[in-house]
Every structure is written in structure tokens, then in C-alpha cells.
Amino acid sequence: ESTSVTVLGLGLMGTALAETLVANGHATTVWNRSAAKADPLVAKGAVRAATAAEAITASPLVVVCLSVYENADEILTGDVLAGRTVVQLTNGTPRQARALAERVTGHGARYVDGGIMAVPQMIGGPASLILYSGDEEAFEARKDVLAALGSPRFLGIDPGLAPLFDLALLSAMYGMYAGFQQAVALVRSEKVQATAIEPMITAWLTATMGGFSEQARALDAGEFGTDVSSVATSQVAFPGLIETYLEQGVDPGWLLALRDLLDRAVAEGHGHDGMARLITLLEQPPA
Ligand code: NDP
């Protein structure tokens, strides 16, 4: 079924969203601050609105994808919002999402926040995941249209949840990349090709990821005891690990932060606990 959709913001991501909506047969109205970015979309069948207010008026569903939340301040405002569903896919913080939800619903609109877990080339494809939170009824009513962009995953009625989970997943990704980059830098100090170790790292990370579910269960149960790989085991091994980097003339980078956390865990008497204990220490940073 075809639905009218408006897309505000035609950067790399907004363009990918609008193109996918057009390709899925939805009557798509677009607006961008720099009007020329709409040209290729208009050629494909989208309708260009002269102003943001005109674009909002054109459709019951308004998808927003700008650089930062502040960009929406002058755009998502006024009586034109009444009765529309605003789906904000701009990256921001939970606090920003909650504040915008309040403002937009104050104008009589329904608010859904979203976090895109994909790059523009993935939009509309099978690996595209989009996290949503906020007005559940409005989300359910528009879910079929939104599903064209990526697999929708609704997290709850608090609009802050989508950005919270988005940033959590990004944090996990950055940590994984940091680990990969450290490992490759270390072996390259002996002229080992990156492509020689990459498959080993990938297999190793895949195997060790099994530990996540164990840590999650331990944390939720508040039972930190372990008979394998305690905090103390890692803490004792870490100086040697750091020393190897220094010997090889490679920056130990983020491993120093992890060493400090392990030292703190042992100093606070958690040496016999499993690695899930580190999560509770992160939750209570030292003053
Ligand atoms: P771009 O830099 O390509 O586009 C930014 C968009 O914001 C443009 O449409 C730009 O308009 C508009 N904009 C910036 N400032 C203003 C303003 N003051 N008033 C009106 N419009 C403004 O960014 P992306 O499209 O890549 O990203 C958009 C959002 O999507 C970001 O929040 C990003 O974090 C998120 N995202 C992006 C991903 C990616 O891989 N690209 C992945 C996941 C999320 P103009 O053309 O006139 O400059």
C-alpha cells in the first residue's frame, strides 16, 4: 500500500532513505536546506517542497534526517505539525530525544525516535537495522512503510531508548574495532601482513563472543563468581601485555584504560570475580 511520506534532510543518509521510499512506490515529498540536493530525487519521482513547512504539510508521516538535533529546532515547529507522525532519525542523545518529543507532541504531533544501524548503502537492504522508541501506536501504524528502510526494532515508549541503544551498539563496535586495530599494529611491528592475521582475529573474536551471554547473565543475577578467567587472572597478565607493546615500539592505546580498570577491580577486592564485574565499576566511576 502506498503512503505519502516526507523526508526532511537530504544528506547522504536522508537521500538513501528518500530513494528507498520512492523505489518502494511511496509518494515522497522531500526538502533540504540546499535545494539542489533534491534534484536527483525529483528526477526519480519525488516531489520537491519549497519550504520545510510545505514538506511537513504534504504527508502524514515525516521522516527527519539532519546532521544534529539542533538543526530541527526551527524546522519541527508550528501548527503544521498537528496530526502528523514525526520520525526523527538524526543521531542524538536520549535527553535530546525526550526534549524534542515533548516539543513536537506539544504541537499536536506524534513522536517516534529512531537510530539507524546502517550506512546509507545498506538502507533498504537485508542487513539494515533501525531502532525505534516513543509513540508505539504511531510506530505500529507506520511500521510497514518504515520496514522498507530496514528491519524495524521497537524498544519501548521512552523516546530516549532508541538513541541509548544506538550509542550502546556503536560503543561495542568501536571497542571491537579498537581491539582489532591494536592487534594488527602489534604484529605489524614484526612485518607481519595484516591480511595474515585478520582471519585469526575474526575467528578468535567470534569464539570469545560466547562470553557475552555469560557476563550478561552474571550481571543480571548479581552473581560475579567464576571458576574460569577471573579479574585477577587478567590483571596479573596485563603488565606483560603492556610491556610487549612498549618493547615492540607500539602504542598500547586503549589497553592502558583497561589495565587501570583491572587494577581498580583488584584494589577494590573483586579479584576473584568474573569479567562482568568490570561493568559495575564502569557504572561507578571513581570521583
Ligand atoms: P550529511 O552531512 O550527509 O547531511 C547532513 C544533512 O543535514 C544535510 O541535509 C544538511 O543540509 C542538513 N543540515 C545540516 N545543518 C542544517 C541546518 N542548520 N538546517 C537545516 N539542515 C541542516 O549527514 P548524513 O546524511 O550522513 O547523516 C544524517 C544523520 O544520520 C546524522 O545524524 C547521522 O549521525 C545519522 N547517521 C548517518 C549514518 C551514515 O553512515 N551516514 C549512519 C547512521 C546514522 P545541507 O545539504 O543544506 O547542508
Image: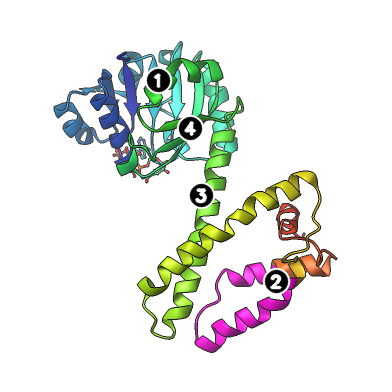
* Residue 257 falls left or right of residue 200: right
Eye-nearest disc, 2 or 3: 2
Gap in angstroms between the C-alphas marked 2 and 1: 48 Å
Which structural element holds mark 4? Answer: strand
Residue at the farthest right position: 269
Residue located beneath label 1 in the image: 144
Gap in angstroms between the C-alphas marked 4 and 2: 38 Å
Mark 1 Cα-neighbour bin, 10 Å: few <14, some 14–19, many ≥20:
some
Q: Which residues are magenta?
A: 233-260
Residue located beneath label 3 in the image: 170
Location of residue 64 with respect to 194 vertically, above or below: above
Residue located beneath label 2 in the image: 234
Lower sequence index among marks 1 and 4: 4
Q: Are marks 4 and 2 in contact (CB under 8 Å)?
A: no
Queried on whether the Cβ of the residue with tag 1 lies below 8 angstroms from ligand 1, the answer reads: no
Mark 2 Cα-neighbour bin, 10 Å: few <14, some 14–19, many ≥20:
some
Please report the residue visible at 32 percent of the width from the left and 15 percent of the height from the top: 3
Mark 4 Cα-neighbour bin, 10 Å: few <14, some 14–19, many ≥20:
many
Amino acid of disc 2: Ser
